[in-house]
Image (cartoon, rainbow, N blue to C red):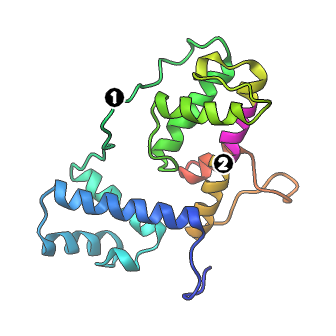
Amino acid sequence: MLETNQQAPAPVAQHKKRLITLINVAKGSLQLDEAIYRAMLKNATGKDSLRVMNLPELEQALEVFKQKGFKPTLNTYKKRRLSPAAGNSKLASIDKIRAIWITMGHHLVIQDNSESALDAYVRRMTLRSKNEGVDATPWMTEPQAYKVLESLKNWHKRVLIERIIARGEHLKMNEKGTRPASYEVIVAQYEGHV
């Protein structure tokens, strides 16, 4: 648990900031006056101020606003290209990459889970290896796709572990109890399935 004079780890602090922004947008979108807004916060979490809420309380508050009709959307000026249907890729790992990318967007790990944003990430990751960058996700070779897939899984898992710990939950460990559990188990724990 963090002492009051310590700062939250950067990804957790960024996630809190993003949740606070979304809740404020929800307040405006639902056209709530201050009294009703504060009452909804208090009813959902026992607190009437976003500043004093921890990460799970902010997630709980956002969920209440979603239940009342708030639909978070991305503000973007250029047209976002969405991922094609699964199963159409030349490599199975590319479908997995897209699935993880979209899930990271749902978990608010990334701000833009469009295919265009994934292409930009793939371009950066593949340029790092021997300057053989590709401009589009479907064009990756198997070794490139493997590298991108593993980097996404590690990034996503790292952020989810920080959030699980910030929620005060006991982290699922591997069979030997020496390291955090597999990527799939950590995602399931974060989503409340284990």
Q: Main secondary structure of the magenta part?
A: helix
Name the residue rendered at 47%, 37% in the picture.
113
Instruction: Kindly identify the residue that appears in the image at 32 percent across and 40 percent down.
Output: 76
In this view of the protein, can residue 194 be seen by the observer? no
Rounded to the nearest angstrom, the CA distance separating label 1 from label 2 is: 26 Å
Q: Amino acid at mark 2?
A: Trp
Residue at the (68%, 15%) spot, across then down: 91
Which residue type does callout 1 highlight? Lys
The image shows residue 31 at horizontal and vertical percentages of 12, 59
Magenta segment? 147-154
Q: Is residue 112 magenta?
A: no
Observer-nearest of 63 and 109: 109
Quadrant into which the N terminus falls: bottom right
Residue at image mark 1: 79
Q: Residue at x 58, y 69 (%)?
A: 166
| Residue 192 rendering spot, x and y as whole percentages | 54, 52
Work out whether residue 193 or residue 102 is closer to the camera in this orientation and state it: 102
Relative placement, left or right, of 29 versus 189 is left
* Vertical arrangement, residue 75 with respect to residue 142, above or below: below
